Image (cartoon, grey):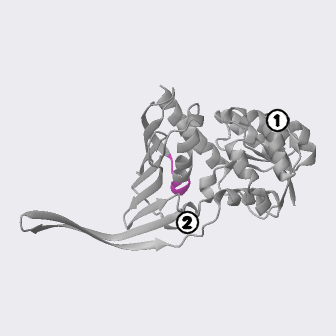
Amino acid sequence: MIRMGLIGLGRMGKYHLNLYDEIPEVKLMGICDINEDEVNKQSKLTGVRGYTDFREMLDSVEAVTIAVPTKYHYEVAKECLLAGKHVLVEKPITTNLEEAKELFEIAKKNDLVLNIGHVERFNGAVMELKKIVNNPYLIESRRVGPFSERMKNDSIILDLMIHDIDIILNILEDEVVDIQALGGSVYSNLSDFASVNIKFKKGTVANIIVSRVTQKKDRTMSIAQEDAFIYLDYTNQDINIYRQGVSQHIFGNKELTYKNEYILERMFVYKDNPLKLEIKNFIDCIDNRSCRVVSVEHELKSLEVALTVDSLLRK
């Protein structure tokens, strides 16, 4: 059983906190936040010892989850790694590529697990994608939803689009040759929506749309390849595959109608809580029962592309 500590009791931190009792391989030894009232409240509810300084609980844990604001990720993760603790840090690992490289180097030098909390990697539908995607020519992704005040100071790319960048890079395993990005602000001083086109060496084009000012929440990805059109719904963890599509125009009496026929396959997807699977994978990596789901090189590439897009939108 791994003795775990949780650093950060904001929105994501509470999601983690609510799952630990469902994972028998974990014993939560401490929770931490700079908000003392929140620490006391959650400590009373869970019976777990609370701290306002994460350093004070490091001696009692083997691993930590870091769910503090992104700007503190590097500082907190570095101290935990140097203290010999395995680390699961929410995405993005940092907002600086060199800092991310340094953290992975520290983890490697000290034989520690350092995982990044890309929860969509553990979405049941996403986990099936690599089995069916074959040389696609067009990928379209939408991750949109209504505005939330708590998000206004966050980069929409590092907060939202990084999920889709990560997934696309993982299924293609191809070199990025061009990136174009357009966006605009509505309620904040940063881009609140963006449309990004990424071209890959083998010819695939990915069009990624992300928005935090769209009234209807939508989390989808479609993949067009020679033998199929694949449609993924992140929210429902569903995959539909359309094959042998045929369309025709039918001329009737003073009217023109359109007919589209295809074979539809609904793929069976094992559905579980993605965040719980993410935590279990982290524990399995520590216990050597499993390996990380993507390489360190992929982690750094996803961050690099996301930072490039973010930079383009800030010009």
Q: Position of residue 112 (x, y in %)?
A: 81, 49
SS class of the residue under badge 2?
helix
Q: Nearer the viewer, residue 175 or 146?
A: 146
Q: Nearer the viewer, residue 145 or 138?
A: 145
Q: Position of residue 30 (x, y in %)?
A: 86, 47
Q: Position of residue 34 (x, y in %)?
A: 79, 34
**Mark 2 crowdedness (10 Å alpha carbons): few <14, some 14-19, many ≥20:** some
Q: Which residue is mark 2?
A: 128
Report the Cα–Cα distance between label 1 and label 2.
42 Å
Q: Please, is residue 226 above or below residue 282 in the view?
A: below
Q: Position of residue 263 (x, y in %)?
A: 35, 74
Q: Residue furthest right?
A: 59
Q: Please, is residue 50 above or below residue 273 in the view?
A: above
Under mark 2, the amino acid is Glu
**Side of 211 relative to 97 (left or right):** left
Q: Please, is residue 144 above or below residue 34 in the view?
A: below
Q: Nearer the viewer, mark 1 or mark 2?
A: 1
Tally of numbered discs:
2
Position of the N terminus by quadrant = bottom right
Which of the 4 image quadrants contains residue 290? bottom right
Q: Which residue is mark 1?
A: 36
Q: Residue at x 83, y 52 (%)?
A: 46
SS class of the residue under badge 1?
helix
Q: Residue at x 46, y 55 (%)?
A: 221
Which of the 4 image quadrants contains residue 209? top left
Under mark 1, the amino acid is Glu
Q: Which portion, as a residue range, is magenta?
A: 170-175
Label located before the other in sequence (1 or 2): 1
